[in-house]
Amino acid sequence: MALTGRDVKWLNRRRAVGLVAVGAAAVLGLATGGTVTQAAPAKPKPTHTQIQLLAINDFHGNLEAPSGSSGNINGVPAGGAAFLATHLKQLRAAAEAKGQDSVTVAAGDLIGASPLLSAAFHDEPTIEAMNGMGLEAASVGNHEFDEGWHELLRMQTGGCLPDGDGQNNQNSCPDAAHPFKGAKFKYLSANVFFENTQRTLFKPYTIKTFDDGRKVGFIGMTLENTPNIVTKSGVEGLTFKDEIETANALVPELKKKGVKSIVVLLHEGGFPADPKAYNSCPGISGPIVDINKGLDPEIDAIISGHTHQGYNCSLPDSAGQPRLVTSASSFGRLVTEVRLSINNATGDVDRLNTMANNQIVTRDVPADRRTSELISKYQTLVAPISNKVIGHLTGTSVSRTPDDSLESPLGDLIADAQLADPSAVTGGKVPVAAFMNPGGIRADLASNAGEVTFGQAFTVQPFNNFLVSMDMTGTQIKALLEQQFSGVNGPEAGKYKVLQVAGITYTWNPAAAAGSKIVPGSVKIGGQPIVDGTSYRIVTNNFLSDGGDGFPAFTTATNKFFGGLDIDAFAKYLTAHDPYTPGPTDRISIGS
């Protein structure tokens, strides 16, 4: 236990008094010729108690150790559920040896946008793994809504989906002898309400009461912007409220229940100026800065996420007092260990003596046996889906890295696949242009010596979105293109979100003002200049169709028709164009 300055002064004063007493007794003994037996000094009662808080965020179903740039921290190989489980056990054991209690929490996006090993089974394996790791509470992230809020409730309560035993490359409860029982931990979401009843989707907070009566409250907070970045149907009937106002309103309620130590599990975060400085927050920016300023000073710590950054520091709250703010990167590569120092006299957190450490989840520890067995089980079950060869590349991979115009080879491939897919054709109306959001392209398309499997394709597009064809006028398409550089996607370059396209070409001017970046006369469909009043059949995914990623122009389209899954279109295109050779990125250009 670390000692505060007050503790040291108290002990020094106690030591001085003891010395005086011993001296007096010794003199008395010598004067009388007797002997002196000194009683053992009473052990001082501790002024503080430490509670270990272990936290992760943005795990995204990465049961297997991630590879490439997503599989290390500053060059150190990191991640993997079996190694994460071992690190958590070792950290808890060290705390127990010191007499400290421990609690494990998460700040959202445990599931969703997951590798096929988890996604093929509706992320049931990840929930089971978290159960085995001793997770106790987690805030709901935006990706928890990827399959809709009804499915998210099933993640909590359990049960099996009637999904046709593997239909669409997914299979709920593949082991009939062991049906899915749901999360043992508590999902928390204080700011997500049902529109009709104004009741929260999940409990807003949980209170951890320890054996000696100490209480710590955990408030779960979901990204307020969730409706703009998930499929509309997934959050239908829900309303997402302001994180600051919601959390502050709960503070008096928790205090009435005797809770003086309060932690917010927030699925929103920030961006340190140096992304490698995972145990500090140099020049941190982003939403977390303003949220910290707005949260009630009674809230003692913020465990954050969403931005996939690692950071750990104290930021001043609105009363000027330091408040711990942390994030453990993503994919289980870091785990945050917080030592909450509780003042025994007040029951509140002593922030000056509360410390945290982001620890790399290295792979040099023994893999946890139980977690390894779980992963092995699902690896066997997913193999027939994952290992199916669907095509070949003339090279080793197709890159998602964009050129100066923000067009990428992989973006072109995906857009071509969507434009060619017959499932989006209705009434003889064939799409003539396709649009793909760059954020939906999660990785380069890799291969095994040129051989591409379904699992590798799924890694690129893990969302199981549906294709949607629709009618848009030339005017609407021009408005859509401008929204790549304006609204939530602008006006500065760092926010630009350039859609990947097929069937359409155009030029944009980086020097032009937001709202006027598309060079007049440059937009062409099928090689012909676009006409404002002409209607064009286009295709995209259902996420964009609902106006996601800051593209409300899609919501003005008409005659929408839902086709098949985007991953199926991608796989079929690779099979039909076997072997595939990437072409030049010449659909989008920059100029004036």
Image (cartoon, rainbow, N blue to C red):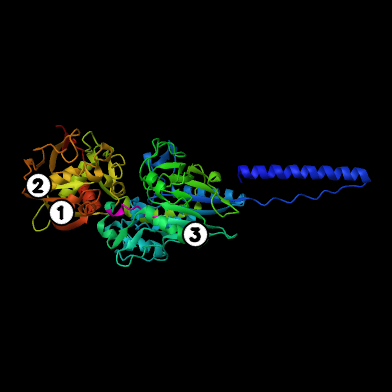
Of all residues, the one furthest to the right in this rendering is 33
> Is residue 565 in the magenta section?
no
Point out the frontmost of discs 2 and 3.
3
Q: Nearer the viewer, residue 358 or 487?
A: 487
The image position of residue 4, as x and y in percent, is 60, 44
Q: Is residue 33 left or right of residue 366?
A: right
N-terminal label among 1 and 2? 2
Residue drawn 35% across and 43% down? 286
**Numbered tag placed on residue 240 in the rendering:** none
Q: Which residues, given as a range, are shown in magenta?
A: 221-227
- Badges 1 and 2: C-beta atoms under 8 Å apart? no
On the image, which quarter does residue 214 sit in? bottom right
N-terminal label among 2 and 3? 3
What secondary structure is found at the residue carrying circle 3? helix
Q: Which residue is mark 3?
A: 255
Q: Which residue is mark 2?
A: 474
**Numbered tag placed on residue 556 in the rendering:** 1
Could you tell me the amino acid type at mark 2? Gly
Distance from Cα at disc 1 to Cα at disc 2: 12 Å
